[in-house]
Image (cartoon, grey):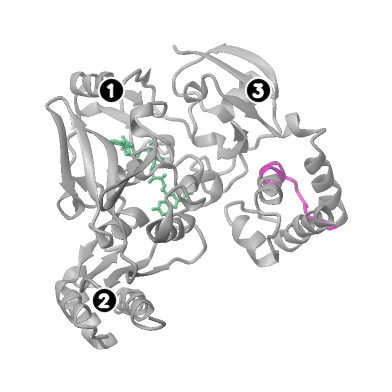
Amino acid sequence: MPDIRLSVNGEAIEESAEARLTLADLLRERLHLTATHLGCEQGVCGACTVLVDGVPVRSCIRFAAACDGQAVQSLEGLEHDPVMEALRAAFTRHHALQCGYCTPGMLIMARDVVLRLPDADPARIRLEMSGNLCRCTGYLGIIEAIHAVILARRG
Amino acid sequence: MKPAPFTYHRAASLEQAVALLAQGGGDTAVLSGGQSLGPMMNLRAARPSQLVDIGRLEALRGISVAEGHVRIGALSTHAAIEDGAVSGPLGRVLARVAAGIAYRAVRNAGTIGGSLAHADPAADWPAALLALDARIHLRGPGGDRAVAIDAFLAGAFETAKAADEVIVAVDVPALGPTARFGYVKFCRKPGEFAEALGAVLYDPGSAQARVVVGATGSRARRLPAAEAGLAAGLSPAAADIAALLAPVLGNPSALVLKRQTAAVHRALQEVLTDA
Ligand SMILES: Cc1cc2nc3c(=O)[nH]c(=O)nc-3n(C[C@H](O)[C@H](O)[C@H](O)COP(=O)(O)OP(=O)(O)OC[C@H]3O[C@@H](n4cnc5c(N)ncnc54)[C@H](O)[C@@H]3O)c2cc1C
């Protein structure tokens, strides 16, 4: 069983786990960080998206052992992140969630879009968010919320 | 949905990775970005008993420019290429192809080497790199070899790579100042695998012409008759393209033939118009 050392939300973690343990299950089952949701478990739906070494990846198809030495951030770790605070407020204002299942993955991807593409227009945001599925059909509000944060940051 | 049990090795060197593959037999798989292997193992469509993680090997990283070509390390991610890791006109072509693969969170992990090794019949890199005339560098127990992509692609999920070989890098010829690239991928939603795919390289300066159809259900294929016409600057009619595609696609349905014809036709138009 591989021994895994990694940081999760800034905290050093040491776990001994079966090789087949995914990062998503490490977060949810071992560390009880349940903001990370599992939808399709084949990389398509985006609900499980977290940051590994600062960039969004699918935690359902990443083996925890392969994250040894890396820095993982789940939604819990971004509670006081200024972009995330702005996005949470905008999601509320624009009614960008209903059941909330897709929301953690949406927020992780939205933050990446805001920081990586400060000039994105709604069409580009739509394209960038196409890898995150919402089954309450809440896309319009989500796109509007992200665009509002981008516009506010432009000042 | 969880993978079947397996043992995990992180390779400390390319030599060690190759040795582990040679010892492990056909049941041992290389792990790069895991963006194809992960889903397949979760679905238990793949059940390797052993994974050799090459994801940290420096020897497989980096991009370098040499005389006449760019060498792209196998571990280069789609996202890095999308962001311009390769410079110049070739870099812009590669960035465009990369940006159309999956979604950013998948592109952050998925690699060009993994995509070529996986050889999904509907994938982007095999078709695009066939049009660009790439060469694949492999390392096996017997040493290094390089294979032209036309000889590398064998069929659906099949390549000329032996089970104990690792893709180390991909060489892509630089593009001349007059080179043009056409690329048309049809899918029902951004980021999905192609339902039809046309890739065309045309350089009137050197009379180079390569016309490729992807998403064939098997390997991506060149269309030599279309290439001969293109080299002479001719734009084939849709009906002529359909006639060339029908035998390559092996008895396609009317819908598939129409879609593929449109993809190849539009890719050709892209290199032949605004020149
Ligand atoms: C939701 C989703 C959508 C996608 N959409 C697209 C798309 O539109 N177009 C597209 O082209 N692809 C798409 N993909 C696939 C993606 O491009 C993968 O990144 C790529 O196919 C595999 O690269 P990888 O590094 O993740 O390889 P892995 O998954 O790690 O490995 C894939 C296979 O290649 C072997 N392998 C990996 N690296 C090497 C190497 N260096 N040498 C030898 N063997 C190796 C492995 O053993 C395995 O058999 C999608 C994937 C997902 C999850």
Residue B98 location in percent, x, y?
A: 44, 54
Please tell me whether mark 1 or mark 2 is closer to you in this view. 2
Looking at the picture, which amino acid does disc 2 mark? Pro
* Labels 1 & 3 near each other (Cβ < 8 A): no
Q: Chain of mark 3?
A: A
Relative to residue A75, is residue A107 depicted above or below?
Answer: below
Relative to residue A148, is residue A38 depicted above or below?
Answer: above
Query: What residue did someone put label 2 on?
Result: B204
Query: What residue did someone put label 1 on?
Result: B17
To which quarter of the image does residue A14 belong? top right
Please tell me whether mark 3 or mark 2 is closer to you in this view. 2
Q: Chain of mark 2?
A: B
To which quarter of the image does residue A95 belong? bottom right
Residue A66 location in percent, x, y?
A: 47, 25
B187 lies left or right of A114: left
> Any mark on residue A8, and which?
3
Q: What's the residue at 28%, 22% (across, down)?
A: B17
Please tell me whether mark 1 or mark 3 is closer to you in this view. 1
Q: Where does the magenta region start and end?
A: A94-108
Looking at the picture, which amino acid does disc 3 mark? Val
